[in-house]
Amino acid sequence: MPYARRRRRLGDRYDGRRLRTLNAFYQITPYIMRERSDAHDYYEDRVDISRTEAWLRELRNRGRPDIGYLQVFMAAMVRTISQWPRINRFVAGRRIFARDKIVLTVAIKKQLHEDGTETTVKIEFNPEDTVFDVSDRINAAIGLNKLDATKNQTDNTAFLFMLFPRFLIRFLIWLMRTLDFYGLMPKAVHGASPFHSTAFITNMGSLGIQPIYHHIYDFGTVSVFVAIGGKEKEYRLNSDGEVEEFRFIPIKVVNDERICDGYYYAKAFKYLRQIFKNPEILENPPESIVEDAD
Protein backbone atom coordinates (compact mmCIF):
# COMPACT_ATOMS: atom_id res chain seq x y z
CA MET A 1 0.00 0.00 0.00
CA PRO A 2 1.19 3.62 -0.53
CA TYR A 3 1.64 6.16 2.22
CA ALA A 4 -1.48 6.96 4.23
CA ARG A 5 -3.87 9.26 2.39
CA ARG A 6 -4.15 12.74 3.90
CA ARG A 7 -6.56 15.49 3.13
CA ARG A 8 -4.99 17.99 0.77
CA ARG A 9 -4.52 21.44 2.23
CA LEU A 10 -3.75 24.84 0.79
CA GLY A 11 -0.04 24.96 -0.03
CA ASP A 12 0.31 21.23 -0.81
CA ARG A 13 1.44 20.02 -4.23
CA TYR A 14 0.11 17.12 -6.27
CA ASP A 15 3.43 15.31 -5.70
CA GLY A 16 3.86 16.09 -1.99
CA ARG A 17 2.44 17.73 1.10
CA ARG A 18 3.93 20.78 2.71
CA LEU A 19 5.54 20.16 6.12
CA ARG A 20 4.12 22.78 8.43
CA THR A 21 5.44 21.71 11.85
CA LEU A 22 9.17 22.08 11.11
CA ASN A 23 11.03 24.54 13.29
CA ALA A 24 11.92 27.96 11.96
CA PHE A 25 15.56 27.07 11.30
CA TYR A 26 14.58 24.36 8.81
CA GLN A 27 11.94 26.53 7.19
CA ILE A 28 14.34 29.40 6.53
CA THR A 29 17.18 27.31 5.02
CA PRO A 30 15.64 27.23 1.49
CA TYR A 31 15.71 31.04 1.53
CA ILE A 32 19.40 31.05 2.47
CA MET A 33 20.46 28.12 0.26
CA ARG A 34 18.18 28.85 -2.66
CA GLU A 35 19.42 26.15 -5.04
CA ARG A 36 20.33 22.50 -4.50
CA SER A 37 23.83 23.32 -5.71
CA ASP A 38 24.09 25.58 -2.64
CA ALA A 39 23.14 22.70 -0.34
CA HIS A 40 25.20 19.72 -1.53
CA ASP A 41 26.52 17.35 1.13
CA TYR A 42 28.92 14.56 0.14
CA TYR A 43 29.05 11.14 1.71
CA GLU A 44 31.23 8.13 0.95
CA ASP A 45 30.93 4.62 2.36
CA ARG A 46 31.86 0.99 1.74
CA VAL A 47 29.00 -1.47 2.15
CA ASP A 48 29.97 -4.90 3.47
CA ILE A 49 28.55 -7.52 1.07
CA SER A 50 29.96 -10.73 2.59
CA ARG A 51 26.56 -11.86 3.88
CA THR A 52 24.75 -10.52 0.82
CA GLU A 53 26.91 -12.57 -1.55
CA ALA A 54 25.95 -15.79 0.21
CA TRP A 55 22.29 -14.78 0.22
CA LEU A 56 22.33 -13.99 -3.51
CA ARG A 57 23.78 -17.44 -4.21
CA GLU A 58 20.95 -18.91 -2.17
CA LEU A 59 18.40 -16.90 -4.17
CA ARG A 60 19.89 -18.20 -7.42
CA ASN A 61 19.45 -21.76 -6.15
CA ARG A 62 15.83 -20.87 -5.37
CA GLY A 63 15.24 -19.77 -8.96
CA ARG A 64 15.89 -16.02 -8.72
CA PRO A 65 19.08 -15.41 -10.75
CA ASP A 66 17.59 -12.08 -11.86
CA ILE A 67 18.35 -10.40 -8.52
CA GLY A 68 21.74 -8.69 -8.40
CA TYR A 69 23.38 -5.89 -6.47
CA LEU A 70 21.49 -3.09 -8.24
CA GLN A 71 18.17 -4.73 -7.32
CA VAL A 72 19.29 -5.34 -3.74
CA PHE A 73 20.56 -1.80 -3.35
CA MET A 74 17.34 -0.29 -4.66
CA ALA A 75 15.29 -2.60 -2.43
CA ALA A 76 17.44 -1.49 0.51
CA MET A 77 16.81 2.15 -0.46
CA VAL A 78 13.06 1.57 -0.54
CA ARG A 79 13.18 -0.16 2.84
CA THR A 80 15.34 2.59 4.34
CA ILE A 81 12.94 5.28 3.14
CA SER A 82 10.00 3.33 4.59
CA GLN A 83 11.65 3.63 8.02
CA TRP A 84 13.46 6.96 7.62
CA PRO A 85 10.96 9.01 5.59
CA ARG A 86 12.75 12.37 5.78
CA ILE A 87 15.04 11.04 3.04
CA ASN A 88 11.95 11.32 0.81
CA ARG A 89 11.52 15.05 1.30
CA PHE A 90 12.19 17.73 -1.29
CA VAL A 91 12.43 21.50 -1.54
CA ALA A 92 10.32 23.44 -4.03
CA GLY A 93 9.23 27.06 -4.05
CA ARG A 94 11.38 27.72 -0.93
CA ARG A 95 9.30 25.22 1.04
CA ILE A 96 9.94 21.68 2.28
CA PHE A 97 7.59 18.87 1.25
CA ALA A 98 7.11 15.20 2.06
CA ARG A 99 6.85 13.25 -1.18
CA ASP A 100 3.68 11.21 -1.63
CA LYS A 101 5.47 8.28 -3.29
CA ILE A 102 8.84 6.54 -3.43
CA VAL A 103 10.18 7.09 -6.94
CA LEU A 104 13.69 6.06 -7.98
CA THR A 105 15.35 7.08 -11.25
CA VAL A 106 18.04 4.82 -12.72
CA ALA A 107 20.45 5.77 -15.49
CA ILE A 108 21.01 2.98 -18.01
CA LYS A 109 23.06 2.56 -21.18
CA LYS A 110 21.39 0.53 -23.90
CA GLN A 111 24.66 -0.75 -25.35
CA LEU A 112 27.99 -0.84 -23.51
CA HIS A 113 30.12 1.10 -26.01
CA GLU A 114 31.01 4.75 -26.46
CA ASP A 115 28.19 5.41 -28.96
CA GLY A 116 25.59 3.49 -26.98
CA THR A 117 22.37 5.35 -26.25
CA GLU A 118 21.82 6.47 -22.67
CA THR A 119 18.41 6.89 -21.07
CA THR A 120 16.77 6.97 -17.67
CA VAL A 121 14.12 4.77 -16.11
CA LYS A 122 11.80 6.20 -13.48
CA ILE A 123 10.15 3.57 -11.29
CA GLU A 124 7.55 3.94 -8.53
CA PHE A 125 7.66 1.74 -5.44
CA ASN A 126 5.55 1.20 -2.36
CA PRO A 127 7.10 1.49 1.12
CA GLU A 128 6.18 -2.11 1.98
CA ASP A 129 7.75 -3.62 -1.19
CA THR A 130 9.98 -6.68 -0.82
CA VAL A 131 13.14 -7.34 -2.79
CA PHE A 132 11.07 -9.50 -5.14
CA ASP A 133 8.61 -6.66 -5.84
CA VAL A 134 11.45 -4.21 -6.41
CA SER A 135 13.42 -6.60 -8.62
CA ASP A 136 10.42 -7.46 -10.80
CA ARG A 137 9.67 -3.77 -11.47
CA ILE A 138 13.31 -2.89 -12.13
CA ASN A 139 13.94 -5.81 -14.47
CA ALA A 140 10.73 -5.18 -16.42
CA ALA A 141 11.53 -1.48 -16.84
CA ILE A 142 15.20 -1.97 -17.74
CA GLY A 143 14.41 -4.90 -20.04
CA LEU A 144 11.92 -2.80 -22.00
CA ASN A 145 14.15 0.26 -22.20
CA LYS A 146 17.24 -1.70 -23.27
CA LEU A 147 15.68 -2.10 -26.71
CA ASP A 148 16.97 0.43 -29.27
CA ALA A 149 13.48 0.91 -30.66
CA THR A 150 12.01 1.77 -27.26
CA LYS A 151 11.43 5.47 -26.57
CA ASN A 152 10.12 6.13 -23.07
CA GLN A 153 8.32 9.22 -21.82
CA THR A 154 11.59 10.97 -21.02
CA ASP A 155 13.04 10.31 -24.48
CA ASN A 156 9.86 11.43 -26.25
CA THR A 157 9.54 14.61 -24.19
CA ALA A 158 13.18 15.56 -24.83
CA PHE A 159 12.74 14.87 -28.56
CA LEU A 160 9.60 17.04 -28.64
CA PHE A 161 11.37 19.95 -26.91
CA MET A 162 14.31 19.75 -29.32
CA LEU A 163 12.02 20.26 -32.32
CA PHE A 164 11.77 23.94 -31.35
CA PRO A 165 14.34 26.68 -32.01
CA ARG A 166 16.77 27.52 -29.20
CA PHE A 167 15.02 30.67 -27.98
CA LEU A 168 11.76 28.76 -27.61
CA ILE A 169 13.48 25.86 -25.80
CA ARG A 170 14.93 28.36 -23.32
CA PHE A 171 11.49 29.87 -22.80
CA LEU A 172 9.84 26.47 -22.31
CA ILE A 173 12.43 25.39 -19.75
CA TRP A 174 12.02 28.72 -17.91
CA LEU A 175 8.25 28.22 -17.98
CA MET A 176 8.55 24.67 -16.60
CA ARG A 177 10.86 25.90 -13.81
CA THR A 178 8.43 28.67 -12.91
CA LEU A 179 5.40 26.38 -12.91
CA ASP A 180 7.31 23.82 -10.85
CA PHE A 181 8.23 26.51 -8.30
CA TYR A 182 4.51 26.96 -7.63
CA GLY A 183 3.63 23.27 -7.96
CA LEU A 184 1.81 23.81 -11.25
CA MET A 185 4.02 21.91 -13.71
CA PRO A 186 1.85 19.79 -16.05
CA LYS A 187 1.59 16.25 -14.72
CA ALA A 188 2.62 14.81 -18.09
CA VAL A 189 5.94 16.69 -17.96
CA HIS A 190 6.40 15.84 -14.28
CA GLY A 191 5.80 12.14 -15.02
CA ALA A 192 8.36 12.17 -17.83
CA SER A 193 11.01 14.11 -15.89
CA PRO A 194 13.74 11.93 -14.32
CA PHE A 195 14.61 14.95 -12.17
CA HIS A 196 11.37 14.67 -10.19
CA SER A 197 11.99 11.63 -8.02
CA THR A 198 13.14 10.56 -4.57
CA ALA A 199 16.66 9.63 -5.63
CA PHE A 200 18.77 9.23 -8.77
CA ILE A 201 20.86 6.05 -8.87
CA THR A 202 23.65 5.06 -11.23
CA ASN A 203 25.45 1.72 -11.16
CA MET A 204 28.99 2.58 -12.24
CA GLY A 205 30.23 -0.87 -11.28
CA SER A 206 28.51 -2.18 -14.42
CA LEU A 207 30.85 0.09 -16.42
CA GLY A 208 33.90 -1.27 -14.62
CA ILE A 209 34.74 1.98 -12.83
CA GLN A 210 34.44 3.29 -9.32
CA PRO A 211 31.68 5.70 -8.24
CA ILE A 212 31.92 9.46 -8.49
CA TYR A 213 30.27 12.27 -6.57
CA HIS A 214 27.47 13.22 -8.95
CA HIS A 215 25.75 16.55 -8.42
CA ILE A 216 22.02 16.75 -7.81
CA TYR A 217 20.09 18.94 -10.18
CA ASP A 218 18.73 22.43 -9.55
CA PHE A 219 15.91 21.55 -11.93
CA GLY A 220 13.34 19.19 -10.42
CA THR A 221 13.00 17.75 -6.92
CA VAL A 222 15.64 15.01 -6.60
CA SER A 223 17.24 15.32 -3.15
CA VAL A 224 19.68 12.38 -3.26
CA PHE A 225 22.08 11.06 -5.93
CA VAL A 226 23.73 7.68 -5.30
CA ALA A 227 26.59 6.25 -7.38
CA ILE A 228 27.39 2.56 -6.83
CA GLY A 229 30.78 1.05 -7.66
CA GLY A 230 31.88 -2.48 -8.50
CA LYS A 231 32.70 -5.20 -5.98
CA GLU A 232 36.06 -4.87 -4.26
CA LYS A 233 38.00 -6.72 -1.62
CA GLU A 234 40.83 -6.04 0.78
CA TYR A 235 42.52 -7.86 3.62
CA ARG A 236 42.33 -6.70 7.21
CA LEU A 237 43.55 -7.75 10.60
CA ASN A 238 40.70 -8.80 12.88
CA SER A 239 40.62 -8.36 16.66
CA ASP A 240 42.57 -11.64 17.05
CA GLY A 241 45.37 -10.43 14.82
CA GLU A 242 44.36 -12.76 11.98
CA VAL A 243 44.13 -11.69 8.35
CA GLU A 244 40.60 -11.89 6.93
CA GLU A 245 39.05 -10.90 3.62
CA PHE A 246 36.67 -7.94 3.51
CA ARG A 247 34.38 -7.70 0.48
CA PHE A 248 32.49 -4.49 -0.17
CA ILE A 249 30.80 -2.18 -2.65
CA PRO A 250 31.85 1.50 -2.56
CA ILE A 251 29.11 4.11 -2.77
CA LYS A 252 29.19 7.88 -3.06
CA VAL A 253 26.18 10.01 -2.20
CA VAL A 254 25.33 13.64 -2.79
CA ASN A 255 22.30 14.93 -0.92
CA ASP A 256 20.37 18.12 -0.25
CA GLU A 257 21.14 19.09 3.35
CA ARG A 258 17.99 21.22 3.58
CA ILE A 259 15.62 18.25 3.90
CA CYS A 260 17.03 16.83 7.14
CA ASP A 261 20.05 17.14 9.43
CA GLY A 262 23.30 15.20 9.35
CA TYR A 263 22.38 13.07 12.34
CA TYR A 264 19.26 11.82 10.57
CA TYR A 265 21.18 11.10 7.35
CA ALA A 266 23.78 9.17 9.35
CA LYS A 267 21.13 7.05 11.08
CA ALA A 268 19.40 6.35 7.78
CA PHE A 269 22.57 5.22 6.01
CA LYS A 270 23.63 3.12 8.97
CA TYR A 271 20.27 1.40 8.68
CA LEU A 272 20.91 0.79 4.96
CA ARG A 273 24.32 -0.71 5.73
CA GLN A 274 22.74 -3.05 8.29
CA ILE A 275 20.35 -4.36 5.65
CA PHE A 276 23.32 -5.71 3.69
CA LYS A 277 24.45 -7.58 6.79
CA ASN A 278 20.99 -9.11 7.14
CA PRO A 279 19.50 -9.01 3.61
CA GLU A 280 16.90 -11.68 4.39
CA ILE A 281 14.70 -8.98 5.89
CA LEU A 282 14.06 -7.72 2.36
CA GLU A 283 12.17 -10.92 1.54
CA ASN A 284 9.26 -9.77 3.71
CA PRO A 285 7.47 -6.40 4.03
CA PRO A 286 8.48 -4.18 6.95
CA GLU A 287 6.52 -4.65 10.16
CA SER A 288 5.39 -1.02 10.02
CA ILE A 289 5.72 2.07 7.84
CA VAL A 290 7.00 5.28 9.42
CA GLU A 291 5.17 8.43 8.30
CA ASP A 292 6.83 11.83 8.05
CA ALA A 293 5.83 14.80 10.23
CA ASP A 294 2.79 17.00 9.54
Image (spheres, helix red, strand yellow):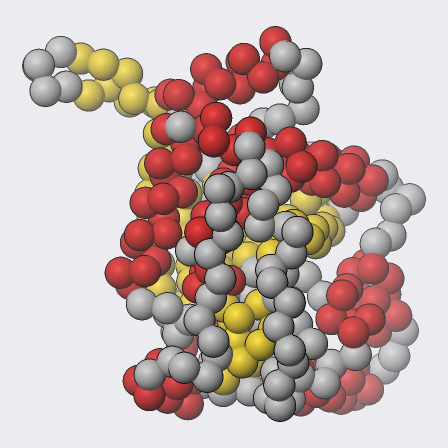
Residue 177 in the image: x percent, y percent?
A: 66, 83
Numbered label tally: 0
Q: Is residue 188 left or right of residue 225?
A: right
Measured along the vertical axis of the image, is residue 47 above or below residue 271? Answer: above
Residue at 39 percent across and 85 percent down: it is 27
Task: Out of 68 and 86, give the one closest to the viewer.
Answer: 86
Q: Is residue 186 left or right of residue 49?
A: right
Q: Residue at x 67, y 37 (%)?
A: 133
Q: Residue at x 64, y 39 (%)?
A: 134
Which percent across, then down, holds residue 99? 58, 67
Q: In the drawing, does residue 201 fall left or right of residue 51? A: right
Q: Position of residue 290 (x, y in %)?
A: 46, 56
Compared with residue 293, is residue 46 higher up or lower down, i.e. above or below? Answer: above
Q: Position of residue 266 (x, y in %)?
A: 30, 54
Question: Is residue 167 positioned above or below 14 on the image?
Answer: below
Q: Nearer the viewer, residue 131 or 1?
A: 1
43 left or right, relative to 196: left
Query: Quarter-wise, where is residue 30 in the image?
Result: bottom left
> Which residue is pictured at 38% across the width and 80% down the height?
22
The one nearer the camera, 113 or 292, is: 292
Report whether residue 29 is seen.
Answer: no
Q: Is residue 164 visible?
A: yes
